[in-house]
Amino acid sequence: MRRAAPAERREYGNAGEEAAVRFLEAQGWRVRDRNWTCRFGELDVVAERDDLVCFVEVRMRSTATWGDPSHSVSFAKQRRVVKAALRYLFAHDLRGRMFRFDVISVVGRGERATVDHIPGAFDAGM
């Protein structure tokens, strides 16, 4: 199987993030930011509902042949997301707000894609 070119992978990743955002908005979340970056890394989606800020890591695969995409969120990736999220809270004057870390996995493309949301998939380790 050939490896997709970088532009093709980015386009595919954008489609996965779009599916995740549509899912979150349908569940009543308001998306604050997408692809927010700082020196610690990137936050795929930052959403909020009521007083809760949610940092969402989006993982996508074209098929489930290699397993659930959510299983690819390594401990090292979790630590980078946590550090970036803490920086986000500080940069946007959201200190003191409740927050959590979710993972959304998207398998497939287009209308046939399946979206799985894992609330509280990992924690800040505090």
Image (cartoon, grey):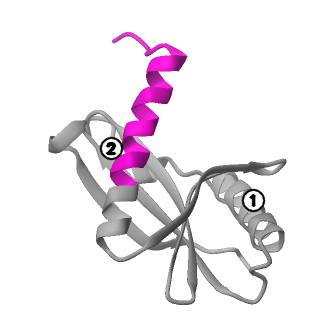
In the picture, the quarter occupied by the N terminus is top left
Q: Secondary structure at mark 1?
A: helix
What percent of the width, then of the height, locates residue 51?
57, 89
What percent of the width, then of the height, locates residue 114?
22, 51
Taking the magenta stretch, the answer to whether it contains residue 2 is yes
One can see residue 68 in this view: no
Residue at the extreme left of the image, as rendered = 112
Q: Quadrant of residue 83?
A: bottom right
| Amino acid type at mark 1 | Ala
Magenta stretch: give its range: 1-20
Q: Quadrant of residue 67?
A: top left
Question: In this figure, which residue is indicated by the disc labeled 2?
Answer: 67
Residue at screen point 72% across, 59% down: 79
Q: Earlier in the sequence, mark 2 or mark 1?
A: 2
Distance between the alpha carbons at the discs numbered 2 and 1: 27 Å
Question: In this figure, which residue is indicated by the disc labeled 1?
Answer: 84
Type of secondary structure dominating the magenta stretch: helix
Q: Is residue 56 above or below residue 124?
A: above
Name the side, left or right, on which 117 lies relative to 53: left
Crowding around mark 2 (Cα neighbors within 10 Å: few <14, some 14 to 19, many 20+) is few
In the picture, the quarter occupied by the C terminus is bottom right
Closer-to-camera residue (78/111): 111
